[in-house]
Image (cartoon, helix red, strand yellow):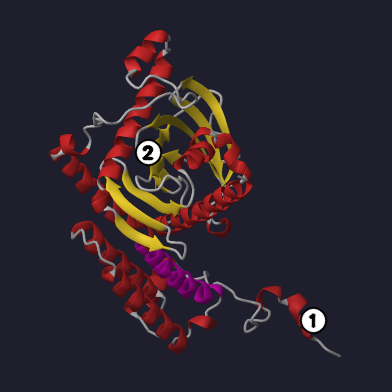
């Protein structure tokens, strides 16, 4: 007759001490006695104290390197992670921790995971963000030193605009004369001011093409550049050649943004919330997800200013607010810096043009910067593909 069940019933607290499923945590001795055993009578094979010392070493090293010495390199976290990982692996192999119950399993695992989480967070979040903020600060300092040269916002005498809905407007009609014909509210005047400021920044970005940094190029000849804009940070620029008249792109992209969802799969919604005056409007846009769904859809509220000039068509924009579209829980509300669409006419061939998209955006959310930058470049190439496809369809119908 098997008596083990009876023994387990008589002594339930002493059963299966060596069973893998029974991992008791020894807490029946006093704290002082445990400390003496762990510290004074330290043994590499049986003590947990060295793992806590290892954590203190890692904490002290990171604090010294990044808080006291203000280093901006990954070698400090690399050393602490290497030492921690090597020590924990040797400890698990040579010691008797795994026979100490649940705590013997849990402590080395948690220590190992924490060390690598620290590495990931510092290398992919903290250091890139600090480097980016330092670049922004230096760019802002440079802008303060030579602000009038970079952002005067003045247009040359040869530049002009007329209302986009009418091609017969007066070339000499100024904004002040237009404003005098209509009484604008304070909010409408703010929209007009924001549109003019965005246009001034876009003009300056276009004027500094020699400072654009090439990032990517695809098989169609589309190129993505970047430039650091003072007070606004990293700005992406798509430049592509299109075998169609500039007026066609002007109509499809700038004058009819609501129809863009019919052919541009990078956006799922575009709505005109308010037309302030002939050159200024407020729009609501929803972007598709990016990076295989890692970047979820975002919505944006932008003020846009449209201008027609002798050598180009221009639609500049920047983030704003509108009472009809407050932020919702459905989308993460992104925020666009100065940017827009520019269609450059060809002086030698009216049947071709150059399209430029300037994009400065903050997608919000807790996303790694490298992922955001990669997704923005891919989105710009995708947009260029759909635009080329669209003008090809329209050209075939003509």
| Location of mark 2 (residue) | 312
- The answer to whether residue 62 is magenta is no
Magenta stretch, overall SS = helix
Tell me which corner region of the image, top left, top right, bottom left or bottom right, holds residue 149.
top left
> Which quadrant is home to the C terminus?
top right
Q: Residue furthest right?
A: 1
Query: Up-down: is 30 above or below 152?
Result: below
Question: Residue 359's spot in the image, x, y percent?
Answer: 40, 45
Quadrant location of the N terminus in the rendered image: bottom right
Q: For this view, does 49 lie left or right of residue 329?
A: left
Distance between the alpha carbons at the discs numbered 2 and 1: 91 Å
Instruction: Give residue 310's position: percent from left, percent from top.
Output: 35, 34
Q: Label 1: which residue?
A: 5
- Helix, strand or loop status at disc 2: strand
Who's the residue at 24% across and 61% down the image? 72
Residue 57: x percent and y percent? 29, 70
Relative horizontal placement of residue 325, taking residue 95 as reference (left or right): right
Placement of 352 over or under 319, stated as above or below: below
For the image, the number of numbered tags is 2
Mark 2: give few (<14), some (14-19) or many (20+) Cα within 10 Å. some
Q: Earlier in the sequence, mark 2 or mark 1?
A: 1
Q: Which label lies toward us, 2 or 1?
A: 2
Would you identify the image quadrant in which residue 324 lies? top right
Residue at (49, 27) in percent of width and height: 282
Determine whether, in the image, residue 118 is placed left or right of residue 268.
left
Q: Please tell me which residue lies in front, 204 or 227.
A: 204
What stretch of residues is rendered in magenta?
A: 102-123
State the residue at coordinates (40%, 55%).
369
Residue 18 can be seen in this image: yes
Nearest the eye: 246 or 214: 246
């Amino acid at each position: 007759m098997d008596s083990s069940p009876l023994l387990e019933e008589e002594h339930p607290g002493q059963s299966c001490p060596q069973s893998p499923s029974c991992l008791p945590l020894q807490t029946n001795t006093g704290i002082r006695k445990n400390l003496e055993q762990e510290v004074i009578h330290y043994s590499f094979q049986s003590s947990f104290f060295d793992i806590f010392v290892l954590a203190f070493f890692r904490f002290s090293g990171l604090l010294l390197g990044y808080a006291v010495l203000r280093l901006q390199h990954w070698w400090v976290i690399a050393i602490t992670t290497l030492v921690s990982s090597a020590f924990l692996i040797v400890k698990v192999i040579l010691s008797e921790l795994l026979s100490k119950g649940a705590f013997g399993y849990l402590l080395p695992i948690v220590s190992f995971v924490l060390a690598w989480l620290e590495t990931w967070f510092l290398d992919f979040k903290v250091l890139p963000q600090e480097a980016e903020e330092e670049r922004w600060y230096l760019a802002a300092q440079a802008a303060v030193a030579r602000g009038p040269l970079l952002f005067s916002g003045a247009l040359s005498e040869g530049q002009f605009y007329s209302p986009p809905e009418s091609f017969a407007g007066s070339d000499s009609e100024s904004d002040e004369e237009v404003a005098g014909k209509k009484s604008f509210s304070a909010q409408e005047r703010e929209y007009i001011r924001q549109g003019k400021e965005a246009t001034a920044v876009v003009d300056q970005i276009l004027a500094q093409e020699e400072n654009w940094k090439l990032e990517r190029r695809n098989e169609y000849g589309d190129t993505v550049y970047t430039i650091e804009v003072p007070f606004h940070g990293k700005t992406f620029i798509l430049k592509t050649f299109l075998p169609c008249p500039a007026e066609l792109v002007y109509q499809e992209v700038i004058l009819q943004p609501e129809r863009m969802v019919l052919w541009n799969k990078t956006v799922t919604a575009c709505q005109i919330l308010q037309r302030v005056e002939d050159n200024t409007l407020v729009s609501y846009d929803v972007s598709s997800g990016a990076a295989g769904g890692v970047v979820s859809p975002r919505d944006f509220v932008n003020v846009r200013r449209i201008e027609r000039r002798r050598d180009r068509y221009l639609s500049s924009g920047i983030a704003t607010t509108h009472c009809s579209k407050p932020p919702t829980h459905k989308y993460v509300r992104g925020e666009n810096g100065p940017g827009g669409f520019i269609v450059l006419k060809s002086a030698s061939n009216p049947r071709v043009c150059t399209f430029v998209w300037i994009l400065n955006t903050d997608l919000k959310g807790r996303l790694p910067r490298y992922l955001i930058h990669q997704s923005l470049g891919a989105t710009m190439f995708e947009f260029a593909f759909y635009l080329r496809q669209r003008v090809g369809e329209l050209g075939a119908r003509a």
